[in-house]
Amino acid sequence: MKDDLGVGDTEIGWLYGIFALFYAAAAIPIASLADKKSRKHIITFGIFLWSLLTAACGLTQNYWQIFMARIGVGVGEATLTPSATSLIGDYFPRKDIPMAVSIFQTGPVIGTGIAFIIGGLVLSAVEQSDPLILPIIGELRPWQQTFVYVAIPGFFLSFFFLLIKEPVRRPSLGPIESKQGLGQLLDFYKQHKATIIYHHLGNLSLVLTGYAFVFWSITFFVRVHGLEAAEASQIFGWIFLVFGPLGPLLVALLAKKLTDRGHKDANITAGMIGGIITIPTILLILVAPSPFWAFIFYAPALTAVNSPFGIASGALPVITPPNLRARVAAGYMLTGAIGMMLGPPLAGAFNEFIFPGYDGVRYSMMTMTIFFGLIGVILLGLGRKHYALSIEKTDDWAEE
């Protein structure tokens, strides 16, 4: 793909970065709609749109065309999290929301694992098949065909969301309800300022660490251990599929146990513990003497890497009035997307300019894991007491 597009590691990283930027930016206006309009219709449209633009990535002829298509994919995917968070908040009582959101957050993890597996299989198949030549567009390279083929199921799956029940919105309660619209949202952020700052920035750092790690994992196995990309993708995908979803679920269970014991900071503490475990487990992969041991260490690493993010999303609806939940979720998406946007291209820049050797990706990933991982853990630790205060502020009025 790099050879066909004539670009380097940094430009490839920015294909994910630009997706993340528009994923976050589009979430803000979409969330305003989700707090008022049919959430299942918004999600249906979004899945159809991102499937269409994923297929378009495979039809592009140069770097800037695929760059623009990735923007469209980001806009489409931005419909899901705010709308789903709002739906979950109306489906479940307050005490069950963190677990419900964490279970929802295993969906992208499972999808990523499946994408690696199917993507590897499709790539392997198309590399061994005859070239695909389309009218006007011409020949599609194997990586282009892979984009087209993996997009097809999305067109059909999008319409399944029309079958779900749109729940009745819960009434909004609490002291900030005297205002509406932007004023109400700003009052919420003012009331929970310290909680939001530490929660968002701490998880931003962990997101940056995690996305840089996942994005460059296949490249790590190709450059450091000499595997073929299709082979590494399939092995990585199976590990991701089996162990990735365990992280959000285990951390959510830990948060529930801590909550039941009276710890009001449970949702932040549990995520922080996941972040602490992430750092050494990634480092074990990077220093492993063989691909066998590296893949063995991937099991605990992927469990840990994914563990903070479900509870990070689940911690917010608990302190948020029902009619603000989609917009507050979108605000968190915006900061999280900065990590998504910067992680892959920053690691790519490290590969090219700081550790330029062929196996420099190993040292880039080490540097980013230690630096940004520690920052994330420290910020979450500092935010625990503020989140506990936010829980106390909402205990008097929040619906059960």
Image (cartoon, rainbow, N blue to C red):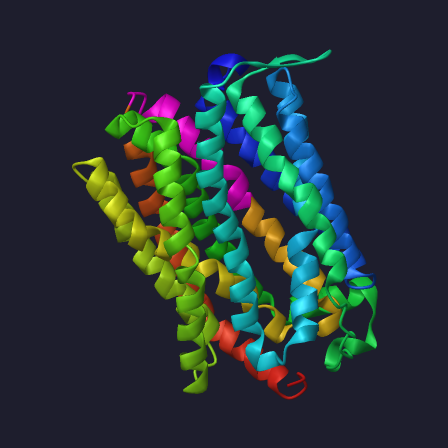
Can you see residue 22? no
Magenta-tinted stretch: 338-358
Main SS of the magenta part reads helix
Indicate the position of residue 256 as horizontal and vertical percent values. 45, 78
Name above or below for residue 16 compared with residue 176: above
Q: Identify the residue shown where x is 20% and y is 43%.
A: 293
Q: Is residue 268 left or right of residue 38?
A: left
Q: Is residue 324 left or right of residue 315?
A: right
Indicate the position of residue 252 as horizontal and vertical percent values. 45, 70
Residue 203 versus residue 128: which sits nearer the camera?
A: 128
Q: Is residue 132 magenta?
A: no
Determine which quarter of the picture holds residue 179. Answer: bottom right
Q: Is residue 64 left or right of residue 260?
A: right
Q: In which quadrant of the rendered image does the C terminus lie?
A: bottom right
Q: Is residue 116 left or right of residue 146?
A: left
Q: Identify the residue shown where x is 56% and y is 78%.
A: 96
The furthest residue to the front: 129
